[in-house]
Amino acid sequence: MSGTTTAGNRRTAGVPRQWRGTEASDGGSNRWVVLLVLCVSLLLVAVDATVLHVAVPAVTEDLRPGGIELLWIVDVYPLVCASLLILFGTLGDRVGRRRVLLLGYGLFGAASAIAAFAPNPQILIVARALLGVGGAMIMPATLSILRQVFPDRRERALAIGIWSAVAAVGAAVGPLLGGFLVENFWWGSVFLVNLPLMIVALPVGRWLLPESTGDKNGPWDVLGALMAACGLFCVVLGVKRVGSGAGPLDAVTAAPVLVGAVLLVLFVRRQRRRTHPLVDLKLFARPAFSISVGCIVLALLALVGLELIAAQYLQLVLGLTPLETGLRLLPLTFAAMAAGLVGSRMLQWLGPRVMVVVGFALTALAVLSLTAMGLSDRPAVLAGGFIVLGFGLETTLFSAYESMLNEASSGSAGGAAAIGETSYQLGAGIGIALLGSVMNAAYKPGVSSVPGVPASASSDASQSLGAAYKVSDRLGGHAGEALRSASRAAFVHGLHVTLAVSAGLLTLGALAALRLPKAMECAADEEESTQGPAEQQGSADQQGLAEQQGLAEQQGLADQQGLAEPQGPAEQQGRAEQQGRAEQQGRDGTKVPDGTKAPARLDRATVAAES
């Protein structure tokens, strides 16, 4: 019965069930279902990074955490997530990306349940840390699976555009969703919302998502993974302390940064010496990869801190509520979604170099236009600036991610995705620290010598605009009103200085992007090198059929010539032996007597039929 099995069935016989229907050659509807599952995964992680911000007052009132505990409740999630991205990204390359992703789903759901019903700050901190571990499992796995499922670069560019648009939606929806849940339920509901989605995502992901691994040569570098995790944890911790107002030369801030830097240097040296490194550092020798990573860092460096400052401006200077603030920022999100959806066509039309440069230029112009923000509300100007800002930022990030991921092979997709996500997190953390420091330096002189305000009160007011408002309320009278007015003006001045610095950083990013490839290359050999096992086998089967057909045609011509020329028994026997040797050599991929190349392989169905 083996002779009745078709070649198409044979192609999928050795392929895992989850892979069937995801090949680029079959119409590929399942690939887009896989993308939907991956986008839902990313949406959960992105929402959870910001959903707690508006619930902090309710958490403070209920659990009564100390100042340090409250800081850890907010920061431990991104801190743990950023430090473990490389570890779990490379682990997915080794043991299976879908396996790591599903484990991340399970851990994320369990940690959400613990966080929702945490009875004290310590339990909530542990639950948030576990959420960070789950997020570190999920984030690089989504990109690496996407890289595997979409071998064609044009389709992959569209998929990355949708993926990045979902990330932008998640970051913006988090505060809005958190505000709605806290107002209507209790603060734990911001975590419980994850459970239904995780309950659905686990079986759906188990059934639909493809399993894939990278190069399994050599042992997984456990020591290197721990060195990278600890080094990144220390560096991000120090950066976040600077962003929260601690001095960069403070011992508690400088020591983690120093230890983290030493560990990362040792990690790099270790990877260069190993035959099978955890992270392929040769990727950074490729300009398209290293410049793309640098562009991601610069884009986040220039804008994440600015976004937080803009939120403070809308609430503290213009007096908007948190919900109104979130609604004012929605044009930025919608513009980012639009850029992600049209990014694929733009990339094919403009090429990576022009697209990243244009994205940086648009973002810089939008940032400069926001200097129109003053003491009075100008909603039309702000909406226009946010639209251009969102479109330019997403254009930059999309094309940088696409160029970076294209430079990595499918076998190292997990490590490359982890590097991209780590650069995103580092850029965000450094941006908050850098732009926050610039903002404080420009803000403090404006409140240091207000007439009628004591020096101690001025010192307290110089910490932040919120602190200045509390001091002014305590002082009351003309002195309190003078301090409030001066602090608002100083904050707007600091905002303008921060916008100028951010525009300068974006200009540097545009200059760096000039080294990116000019055109979007989609060579046939490149696409073949990124195909999955089933796709490569299908191509090989088609090639075998074509070559076998050519051999059959040649044999038919030879038979016709034999019929045309009378031959004796000895000659017929010699021709039969020669034909047998030619067929055997053709199966082995050797040269046949007439000098032509015989097929390297026969179709598996034909071999089965012959047997």
Image: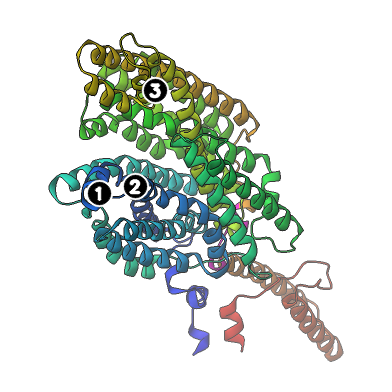
Task: Say which element carries label 2.
Answer: helix
Task: Say which element carries label 3.
Answer: helix
User: What residue is pinned by disc 1?
Assistant: 59
Say whether residue 559 is left or right of residue 380. right
Type of amino acid at the residue the image marks with label 1: Val
Mark nearer the viewer, 2 or 3:
3
Q: Kindly report the secondary structure that dominates the magenta region of the rendered protein.
A: helix
Task: Say which element carries label 1.
Answer: helix
Say whether residue 206 is left or right of residue 302. left
CA separation in Å, label 1 and label 3: 29 Å
Q: Are marks 2 and 1 in contact (CB under 8 Å)?
A: yes
* For marks 2 and 3 on the same chain, the one whose residue lies earlier in the sequence: 2
User: What residue is pinned by disc 2?
Assistant: 70
Relative image position of residue 235 (x, y in whole percent)? 56, 46
Say whether residue 410 is left or right of residue 429. right
Residue at x 21% of width, y 47% of height: 61
Q: Quadrant of the C terminus?
A: bottom right
Nearer to me, 414 or 496: 496
Classify mark 1: residues with Cα within 10 Å, few (<14), some (14-19) or many (20+). Answer: many
Classify mark 2: residues with Cα within 10 Å, few (<14), some (14-19) or many (20+). Answer: many
Residue 423 in view (yes/no) = no
Q: Which residues are magenta?
A: 527-535
Relative image position of residue 155 (x, y in whole percent)? 47, 48
Quadrant in the picture for residue 258: top right
Type of amino acid at the residue the image marks with label 2: Leu
* For marks 2 and 1 on the same chain, the one whose residue lies earlier in the sequence: 1
Considering every residue shown, the one lying at the far top of the view is 451
Q: Are marks 1 and 3 in contact (CB under 8 Å)?
A: no
Vertical comparison of 312 with 558: above or below: above
